[in-house]
Image: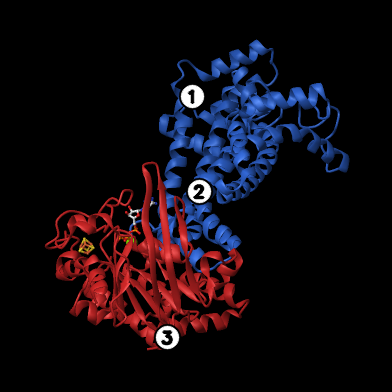
């Protein structure tokens, strides 16, 4: 796998304005995604995963706004692109599978027409027969019956709708697919099929996939590299095997120790307390009120995200000191 | 059986039931008036000084009400006459029949209202969609909404009075009342058509502007609501052009409730914009009803009310029939 970067997020900040103060849902996040890799984003509910995806794609709606940072894609900062440039780049290069994909299809348009809209917008007027042929090929290769194209969204089950959206995300052979909790609302058997479909798409058209899910079992199984988020910040990034074999950040350890319980949305095993209120995050390390290893410095100084070798980065004072000592 | 056919038959049965019920009530109510209806009518006619044809009228009513037989025979007679389009004679305008009067009034009402209602609906919906879509970002639309609110709150007849005062009295550009100038003979001549249009502008404007405000506000709030839907976010992520998202995604979804509103409004047309027609002495159904009420012309009141009920029922039936085509999610009854 090459070391080049397909997309690089630098110090991205996305906040929500509320009456009781600003919710710092994404607060200085940096990472990159390589070509053809599946990059996972993990973290408890409310840590800012969806906000991160929306901010990267510049789809954040008020009261949310981007407070700073860069999203570099093909040498350009997406956050600075003109509206029209951004529009023509969407879906063609970066497609998106939203978290609430159950209602992501237009209820009064046939599936075929919703896909045809994308093709026509990005490739100009194409004869209908050709569009139909492409949709049929797409559906066959993604395990959907071509008859689905003639249907309306309400005629499909949840799993089928998800499949349609994933198939649609691949129609223009994008370089990156951002998938936000694509399996969460589905039962386990359907989940398997959806994950396999994402893998197939990556292997077939070579897109990178940014896979957001709080389900650590899914992360372990599917992704190449994993970033762990806590309270609006990334606390650790590394190859998924390394992270699972030897988690560095205390929060990552807790997440991994809690694979079954997190799926049921119960509180993390061995962790006291709840994630902080993002309007008033704790000073220093945001994890310190819940961290079993917290020291004095953790309460005052925010640990920076540092490289600790083998392409791994972590934000924790335990490792900063090691660095300094070394 | 195709599910749509089954659905249609179900709706048709409901429609027939409601229509029958309306006719039944129209049959029963006059019979509940104490006393002999024929004597009463005759008395009224004599009071008006109508002497000729009194006998004829009594005969006609006897035939129509079938007053000789029992209630069942009477109802059958009544239905038979109704099917022939016989709603009886007007008392105030004897020997004109109720059907003749309605026949004269209906075209004016339908002509005036169908054009204004549909026009208001189209313009209001389009402007409302733009206002809802541009919303907070645009200053212009921010100023339009309060105006629309004011116009939709002003009762249409008040607005009619204001228009008459301004544009017929103060600055006499348009005629004050009527559907065409006195002395003109209705024909398909150019001058008559122009005259009719000139007479219809103020009543049309009063209805147009007030109902436009209503459609505007309704469409605007629908679009604002739909803007937050996931499929709009998705459409944006797909890189669709803004006008595609607005018209083909947001507007198309908002058209469902908006179309229901239009069909119901069209059903109400037949009743006329009662007060507007009174303000302008416009010879439509509202004017007819108003005059019938002031002269206690029961057969006309009854006939007009029956026609209005039938029109509203028919409009509702039409919505039921076309709705499955505009909203694919509609389920055909017990499927
Ligand atoms: N419209 C909004 N207004 C105010 N706060 C918001 C809004 N949307 C999200 N937030 C807050 O931002 C934070 C991050 O939300 P986000 O949806 O990104 O989390 P998430 O990690 O995707 O969670 P989940 O796993 O539940 O999807 C949460 O604390 C949430 O309460
Ligand atoms: S910085 Fe301190 S509080 Fe934060 S995770 Fe590391 S040890 Fe725990
Ligand atoms: Mg989320």
Residue where numbered disc 2 is placed: B224
**What is the quadrant of residue A179 in the picture?**
bottom left
Front residue of this view, candidates A310 and B82? A310
Please check whether the numbered discs 2 and 1 fall on a single chain.
yes
Split into 4 quadrants, where in the image is the N terminus of chain B?
bottom left
Coloration of the structure image: by chain
Residue ID at (52%, 60%): B249
Looking at the image, residue A182 lies above or below residue A289: below
Looking at the image, residue A259 lies above or below residue B169: below
Q: Which chain is blue?
A: B
* Residue A100 spot, x, y in % from top left: 36, 62
Q: Chain of mark 2?
A: B
* Residue B288 visible in this rendered orientation of the protein: no
* Residue A229 spot, x, y in % from top left: 30, 65
Please check whether the numbered discs 1 and 3 fall on a single chain.
no
Residue ID at (65%, 22%): B291
């Amino acid at each position: 796998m090459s070391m080049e970067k397909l997309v690089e997020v630098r110090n991205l900040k996305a906040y929500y304005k509320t009456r009781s103060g600003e919710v710092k849902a994404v607060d200085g996040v940096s990472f990159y995604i390589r070509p053809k890799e599946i990059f996972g984003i993990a973290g408890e509910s409310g840590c800012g995963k969806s906000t991160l995806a929306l901010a990267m794609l510049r789809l954040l709606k008020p009261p949310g706004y981007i407070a700073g940072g860069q999203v570099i894609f093909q040498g350009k900062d997406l956050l600075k692109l003109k509206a029209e440039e951004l529009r023509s780049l969407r879906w063609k290069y970066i497609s998106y599978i939203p978290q609430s994909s159950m209602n992501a299809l237009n209820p009064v348009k046939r599936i075929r027409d919703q896909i045809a809209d994308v093709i026509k917008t990005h490739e100009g007027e194409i004869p209908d027969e050709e569009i139909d042929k492409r949709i049929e090929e797409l559906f066959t290769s993604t395990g959907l019956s071509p008859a689905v194209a003639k249907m309306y969204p309400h005629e499909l089950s949840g799993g089928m709708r998800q499949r349609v959206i994933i198939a649609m995300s691949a129609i223009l052979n994008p370089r990156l697919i951002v998938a936000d909790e694509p399996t969460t609302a589905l039962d386990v058997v359907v989940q398997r099929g959806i994950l396999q479909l994402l893998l197939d798409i990556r292997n077939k058209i070579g897109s990178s996939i940014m896979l957001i899910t709080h389900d650590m079992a899914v992360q372990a199984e599917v992704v190449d590299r994993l970033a762990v988020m806590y309270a609006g910040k990334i606390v650790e990034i590394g190859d998924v095997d390394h992270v699972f074999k030897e988690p560095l950040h205390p929060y990552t350890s807790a997440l991994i120790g809690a694979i079954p319980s997190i799926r049921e949305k119960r509180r993390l095993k061995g962790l006291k307390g709840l994630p902080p209120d993002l309007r008033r995050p704790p000073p220093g390390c945001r994890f310190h009120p819940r961290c079993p290893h917290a020291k004095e410095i953790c309460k005052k100084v925010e640990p920076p995200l540092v490289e600790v070798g083998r392409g791994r980065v972590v934000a924790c004072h335990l490792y900063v000191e090691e660095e300094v000592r070394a | 059986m195709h599910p749509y056919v089954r659905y249609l038959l179900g709706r048709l049965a409901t429609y027939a039931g409601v229509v029958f019920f309306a006719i039944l009530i129209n049959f029963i109510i006059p019979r509940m008036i104490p006393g002999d209806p024929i004597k009463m009518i005759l008395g009224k006619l004599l009071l008006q000084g109508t002497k000729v044809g009194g006998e004829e009228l009594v005969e006609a009513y006897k035939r129509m009400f079938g007053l000789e037989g029992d209630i069942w025979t009477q109802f059958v007679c009544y239905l038979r006459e109704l099917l022939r389009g016989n709603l009886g004679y007007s008392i105030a305008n004897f020997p004109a029949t109720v059907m003749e009067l309605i026949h004269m009034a209906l075209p004016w009402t339908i002509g005036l209202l169908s054009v204004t209602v549909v026009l208001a609906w189209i313009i209001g919906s389009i402007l409302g969609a733009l206002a809802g879509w541009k919303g907070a970002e645009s200053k212009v639309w921010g100023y339009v909404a309060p105006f629309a609110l004011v116009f939709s709150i002003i009762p249409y007849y008040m607005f009619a009075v204001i228009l008459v005062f301004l544009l017929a009295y103060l600055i006499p550009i348009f005629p004050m009342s009527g559907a065409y100038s006195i002395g003109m003979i209705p024909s398909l001549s150019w001058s008559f058509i122009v005259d009719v249009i000139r007479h219809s502008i103020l009543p049309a404007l009063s209805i147009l502007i007030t109902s436009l405000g209503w459609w505007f506000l309704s469409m605007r709030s629908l679009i604002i609501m739909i803007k937050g839907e996931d499929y709009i976010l998705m459409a944006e992520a797909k890189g669709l052009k803004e006008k595609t998202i607005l018209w083909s995604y947001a507007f198309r979804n908002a058209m469902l409730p908006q179309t229901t509103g239009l069909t119901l409004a069209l059903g109400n047309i037949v009743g006329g914009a009662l007060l507007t027609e009174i303000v302008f002495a416009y010879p439509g159904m509202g004017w007819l009803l108003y005059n019938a009420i002031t002269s206690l012309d029961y057969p006309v009141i009854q006939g007009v009310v029956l026609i209005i009920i039938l029109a509203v029922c028919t409009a509702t039936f039409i919505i039921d029939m076309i709705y499955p085509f505009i909203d694919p999610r509609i389920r055909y009854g017990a499927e």
